[in-house]
Image (spheres, rainbow, N blue to C red):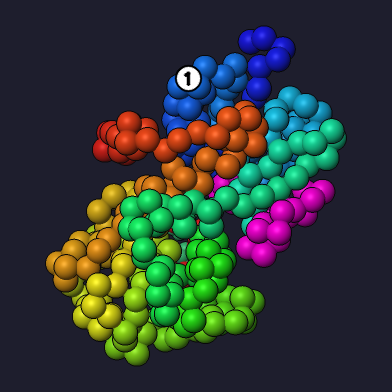
Amino acid sequence: MADESIRSGVIGHPITHSRSPLIHGNWIAEYGIDGAYNAYDVSPADLSGFLRRVRGGELAGCNVTIPHKEAMLEHIDELTDTAEAIGAVNTIWREADRLLGDNTDAYGFLANLDHAAPGWDENPRCAVVLGAGGAALAVLHGLLSRGFADIRIANRTAARAERLAARFGGSCHAMDWAREEALYSDADFVVNTTSLTMGNETDQQVWSGLDHVAEGATVTDIVYSPLQTSLLKAAQRRDLPTVDGLGMLLHQAVPSFERWFGTRPEVTPGLRRRVEEDLAAGH
Ligand code: NAP
């Protein structure tokens, strides 16, 4: 590899499931960039050592995934306002010997909806957010930035939803996950951020709350494997517009790629097809 080659990648533990090398590798080839993007399995114990390599110039920066997104905060010299507000980092880059951190998940979440369901936030009244884990942080930040007046957070473990509502404040409040009618009543937007839809749950039972949403409410799931989750299928049976979670993964990669490689890449149908094929092949 030539010296001027730009190196980046994704760190996590485990990391084999990540589609980021496929996405960024596709863009590196498409735009003829002299660079590389690899997956690095970095355990929490090895994180400081890996970041010394980034500071030393071995990499231009990297993406950060589970379990390092929140732990990264204490290793970064400067955070963007977005990363600060979300409280998690998914993109880092180097300026001289300093490390800077951003979070592009909220951007990816919003860009996916803007592309797949234009006008979804025209009347930002009531949104239901299912889940209160790491991904919910970015989703809440995104929904607040679009001015939703009533954001209902529900989680299996109620205390976590209450913590998030207290942290974000404003129009966010925690609601009882089990009290479906109150939770979904007249909602214009529903997003699942839990890992629940990855399993074989009986959607008939789990998603009956959708009977109470406003007419034409947009329903999205950030889980993208499977692509058509039980929530999306339940919404489609009720003729509600749906958006799957793969676009969030593709769009969150755009600002990161631009940061390291200097070219703003495009999310094309061809890229989406390649990632869909990879998911279908179960790699
Ligand atoms: P996380 O921090 O581990 O949070 C998991 C969430 O799922 C918690 O709210 C948890 O509730 C809930 N949950 C898990 N199993 C459940 C069950 N059986 N019933 C009800 N709730 C359940 O994970 P995360 O980082 O937020 O990620 C969540 C999902 O989003 C993952 O599937 C991830 O792949 C996906 N994701 C997608 C994108 C994208 O770009 N499309 C980006 C980020 C994440 P408790 O608090 O009660 O445990």
Residue 157: in sight, yes or no? no
Q: Nearer the viewer, residue 144 or 121?
A: 121
Residue at 58% over, 42% down: 255
Name the residue that disc number 1 marks. 29
Residue 116 image position (x, y, % from top left)? 33, 53
The quadrant holding residue 54 is top right
**Where are the magenta residues, as a range?**
64-87
Q: In this view, does 191 lie to the left or right of 149?
A: left
Residue at 31% over, 66% down: 219
Q: In this view, does 267 lie to the left or right of 49?
A: left
Q: In this view, does 240 lie to the left or right of 120?
A: left
Q: Which of 157 and 242 is in front in this view?
A: 242
Figure check: 269 above or below 111:
above
* The N terminus - image quarter: top right
Say if the magenta span includes residue 69.
yes
Q: Is residue 245 left or right of residue 40?
A: left
